[in-house]
Image (spheres, helix red, strand yellow):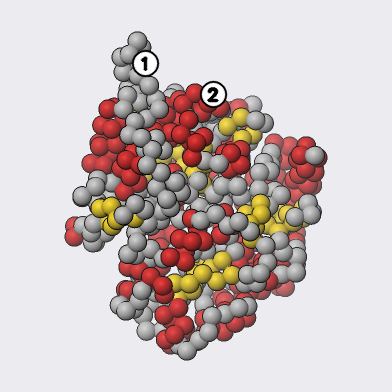
Amino acid sequence: MKKSYVILLAVVLLFSTLIGCSQGSNSTNAADKGDNSSTAKPENNGKPAKTVKIKYLVPGTEPKDYKEVFQKVNEKLAADGVGVEVEKIYIPWDAWDQKLNLMLSTGEDFDLFHVMQDRTPFSSYYNRGALADITDAIEKYGQNLKKHIPDDIFDGAKIDGKYYAAPSYWVEMASEGEFNIRRDILRENNLKEPTTPAELISAWETVMKNWKGSNKPYLGTRADFDPIFLHTSILHRTYDTFPFTVKDKFFYVNQNGEVKSWIETEEFKKDASFMRELYTKGITNPDILVMKQEQVDAQLDSGDWFVRLGTGGSLTGLKKYNPEATVNDIGVVWFNPEKEYLRPLTFKNGNAVPVNSKHPEAAVKFMDWMLASQENYDLVQYGIEGKHYTKDGEKGYKPIKDPNNNNNPGYRGSDSQNGNVNFMRFDLENSIPDNNKVLFEPNPNAVNSIAANFIFDPTNVRAEYTNIMSEASASITPIYMGVLEYDKAFPAALEKMRKAGLDKVVAEYQKQFQEYQASLK
């Protein structure tokens, strides 16, 4: 049975294309000073434990000075008696799903990998027998993880009372539903901040017509049909049915516990209509269906953007278009800001141990060691002090430009991969204050989706779930992205989805969700 699960894992992950998550962060919060040693103790009658080398898979491009920094990381791990050495393996973003899929399905030797809940949630790996139970390791070696990750977030990494992932507590999930807008571009075009989707489109048309940059400020995103990935959830606050969320790409869930097929809702149709208007008015790239993440990132980094769904950007990027820009020239906009702020997921990113790992305890020790002190965290995330960054007060840091690396620092880790708000630092000169507040400060008015911690088990509909994933990528994505007109294309697409097993999967999801709700009473 496990062998068949692994084969199916290869098929399912191949079609998993959600990216929701950012590749890094110029962010921080109050830095917890901690102490300077790991909680891991030397073993064997006071003698240091034998060093175990682990391989840690992450998406992205290897930083120029990665090897130098992780030599220092491994030296510090040794000095602290942790008994762990880490090799980080970088996989390009557009190859991530396929490469990870192959490595899991072939049982390749590695010990830790990054999980993006809004792309492929850890439950998807669990349901296919790909994850190790790390409960005992966390209880024995995870004191700092438990200390610095709130219980309600850590509990989101449990299935049947056991831990199968370690969350990264790096972002306030209630930030879902906002978007960034360029205030300098609004001023340049004598425009007011939009308060409705129609006003946003109208402003965007004006900006496109008057744009002075080298490339048009298209909506910067890859194609998909999941609003949580695309951040088209900004539209949902304008619907009378809000608050609701879309879980696991296919399932509309509102706060009354109603579960429906997402693509068959009026809300999906409204989203698709909005995207169609963007497409027909030239606001999305005409090649949107084949855009690669590197192309999207290049556009956003160039400063050739007016609006980006979700939050992002830095002063460096802004100045490439407008040399006079300041950190206050990016604003955060919410439609209907008086409405509730909803957390669709308990946590956004995390890390998990594959079932074939020979060193699950060592993987947990490394994650825990990162949060044992500010010194450890700074080394992994910001590099070597004096070469890659300098401290800027208690909460800040200044990246040091490297002329041999396009004037970018020679090293930068990723808060989104394994960050923690208790240790994160701000680039006070270049990061965006409005974004920092939304992303890295708790929102006291936010509520969790009632489905935030629900884990769907597709075992009973495994073939159908795989089939609808594949069919949706081919048939639904062009409609949701506005490339095909909903009224003309949707009926045939829905018929294909039903033939692939949509109704059966939705019925199973509804059944499990009802059982989940009943278990909470």
Give the x, y percent position of residue 240.
Answer: 75, 69
Which percent across, then down, holds residue 492?
Answer: 73, 64
Q: Quadrant of the C terminus?
A: top right
- Residue 492 appears in the figure: no
- Which residue is tagged 2? 136
Left of 413 or right of it: where is 219?
Answer: right
**Extreme-top residue of the structure:** 45
From the viewer's perspective, is the residue at label 1 or at label 2 nearer?
Answer: 1
Residue placed under numbered mark 1 in the picture: 43
- Compared to residue 160, the image places residue 51 above or below, namely above
Residue type for callout 2: Asp
Q: In which quarter of the view is residue 445 placed?
A: bottom right
At a point 79% along the width and 54% down the height, the residue shown is: 256
- Quarter of the figure that contains the N terminus: top right
Q: In this rendering, is residue 39 above or below 288?
A: above
Tell me residue 124's x, y (percent): 60, 41
Residue displayed at 78% across by 47% down: 510
Q: Where 209 falls versus 492 (above or below)?
A: below
- Residue in the image at 55% along x and 71% along y: 333
Residue drawn at x 51%, y 56% is: 441
Query: Which of the two discs, 1 and 2, labels the residue nearer the N terminus?
Result: 1
Give the number of marks. Answer: 2
Callout 2: few (<14), some (14-19), or many (20+) C-alpha neighbours within 10 Å? few
Q: Secondary structure at mark 1?
A: loop
Say if mark 1 contacts mark 2, CB within 8 Å.
no
Q: Is residue 258 left or right of residue 423?
A: right
